[in-house]
Amino acid sequence: MPAPDPHGITIEERPQGWGVLVETFMLSGRTQRMARAKCILRNLAANGWACRWCGGPVPEFRRADARYCGEGCRKRAARSRRKAEARASFPDADARGMG
Ligand SMILES: [Zn+2]
């Protein structure tokens, strides 16, 4: 199965909503692209596809399931999540200066 082509999909922000254009002249990739476009639209409808870390817009060329606008936000979010988990495991770590 060929990987989905990120350049086969165009996303537009319109006054009345979001538009996702799918290039379908290549019949072989059509089903995958339609599925991907639906996934993208679902994300847009859910939160306007804002970065979960900084709230900025997630670039349309990123994967359909991308939750962050870039590697920096993804890493910062992952790091803070790990920190939160560590604190949950060791509730008194901060008090002992181990945070
Ligand atoms: Zn971000």
Image (cartoon, rainbow, N blue to C red):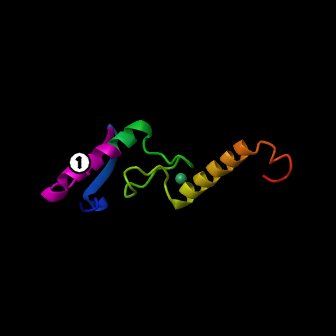
Secondary structure, mark 1, is helix
Magenta stretch contains residue 69: no
Whether residue 71 appears in this view of the structure is yes
Whether residue 20 appears in this view of the structure is no
Residue 6 horizontal side relative to residue 76, left or right: left
Residue 86: x and y in percent read: 70, 48
User: Magenta segment, which residues?
Assistant: 17-40
Q: Which residue does the numbered mark 1 point to in the structure image?
A: 34
Residue 28 horizontal side relative to residue 42, left or right: left
Residue 50 horizontal side relative to residue 31, left or right: right
Residue 56: x and y in percent read: 51, 49
Residue 97: x and y in percent read: 85, 52
Residue 67 horizontal side relative to residue 92, left or right: left
Give the class, few, some or many, for how many residues have Cα within 10 Å of label 1's Cα (few <14, many ≥20).
Answer: some
Type of the residue with mark 1: Met
Q: Residue at x 81, y 43 (%)?
A: 92
10, above or below 85, in the image: below
Q: Residue at x 23, y 48 (%)?
A: 34
Magenta stretch contains residue 31: yes
Q: Residue at x 81, y 47 (%)?
A: 94
Q: Residue at x 56, y 60 (%)?
A: 72
Residue at the limit of the structure toward the front, as seen here = 89
Splitting the image into 4 quarters, where does residue 2 fall?
A: bottom left
Q: Nearer the viewer, residue 62 or 84?
A: 84
